[in-house]
Image (cartoon, rainbow, N blue to C red):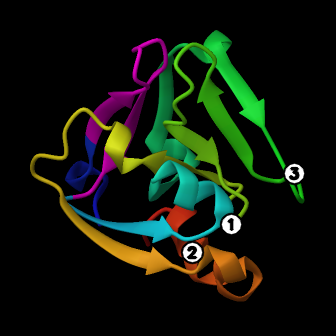
């Protein structure tokens, strides 16, 4: 897919102190996850390569939380507590953006699939391609 097919979309936390942009194609693969963290927060994952994510405001407001293997870097706005994006364990070379934190998904066909995060070790490999640039 040509880089011209991607559109930069803005999003952020609830209070607006943290803002980001993510470049998305017209059709996007997203995941809901049943792991302990995602099930409690309702996170809808849009995993993208490093080059298609940029933090535009609020780096100083981000608070980090890690657990278990400490590979995933869960980032929260220290003011409102919303996790708009994070560095996922499955894709440490990319970012997972919460689709629910985007300002708009107009013009984007979101294909949401269930991901079995309760059995993460057995399924994490199926996400590896999402943080790679299209061939």
Mark 2 Cα-neighbour bin, 10 Å: few <14, some 14–19, many ≥20: few
Quadrant in which residue 29 is drawn: bottom left
Q: Which residue is mark 2?
A: 127
Mark 1 Cα-neighbour bin, 10 Å: few <14, some 14–19, many ≥20: many
Asked whether, in this view, residue 103 is left or right of residue 14, the answer is left
Give the image location of residue 39, x and y in percent: 54, 61
Taking the image as drawn, is residue 132 in sight? no
CA gap between label 2 and label 3 equals: 19 Å
Taking the image as drawn, is residue 111 in sight? yes
Asked whether, in this view, residue 116 is left or right of residue 87, the answer is left
Which secondary structure class fits the magenta region best? strand
Q: Can you tell which mark lies on residue 70?
A: 3
CB contact under 8 Å: marks 1 and 2:
yes
Q: Residue at x 56, y 54 (%)?
A: 40
Considering every residue shown, the one lying at the far front of the view is 40
CA gap between label 1 and label 2 equals: 7 Å
Q: Which residue is mark 1?
A: 90
Asked whether, in this view, residue 6 is left or right of residue 88, the answer is left
> Residue 125 versus residue 4: which sits nearer the camera?
125
Q: Residue at x 31, y 30 (%)?
A: 10
Give the image location of residue 85, x and y in percent: 53, 40
Asked whether, in this view, residue 94 is left or right of residue 114, the answer is right
Q: Residue 22: say if magenta.
A: yes
Q: Is the C terminus in the top left, top right, bottom left or bottom right quadrant?
A: bottom left
Magenta region? 8-25
First in residue order: circle 1 vs circle 2: 1
Give the image location of residue 31, x and y in percent: 43, 68
Q: Can you tell which mark lies on residue 38?
A: none
Q: From what the image shows, is residue 121 above or below residue 30?
A: below
First in residue order: circle 3 vs circle 1: 3
Q: Residue at x 31, y 51 (%)?
A: 24
First in residue order: circle 2 vs circle 3: 3
């Amino acid at each position: 897919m040509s880089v011209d097919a991607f559109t930069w979309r803005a999003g952020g936390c609830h209070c607006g102190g943290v803002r980001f942009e993510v470049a998305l194609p017209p059709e996007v693969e997203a995941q809901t996850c049943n792991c302990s963290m995602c099930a409690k927060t309702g996170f809808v994952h849009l995993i993208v390569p490093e080059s298609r994510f940029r933090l535009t405001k609020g780096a100083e407001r981000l608070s980090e939380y890690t657990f278990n293997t400490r590979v995933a870097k869960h980032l929260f706005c220290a003011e409102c507590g919303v996790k708009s994006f994070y560095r996922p364990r499955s894709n440490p070379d990319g970012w997972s953006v919460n689709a629910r934190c985007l300002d708009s998904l107009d013009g984007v066909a979101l294909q949401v699939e269930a991901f079995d995060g309760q059995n993460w070790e057995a399924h994490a490999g199926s996400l590896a391609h999402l943080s790679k640039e299209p061939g």
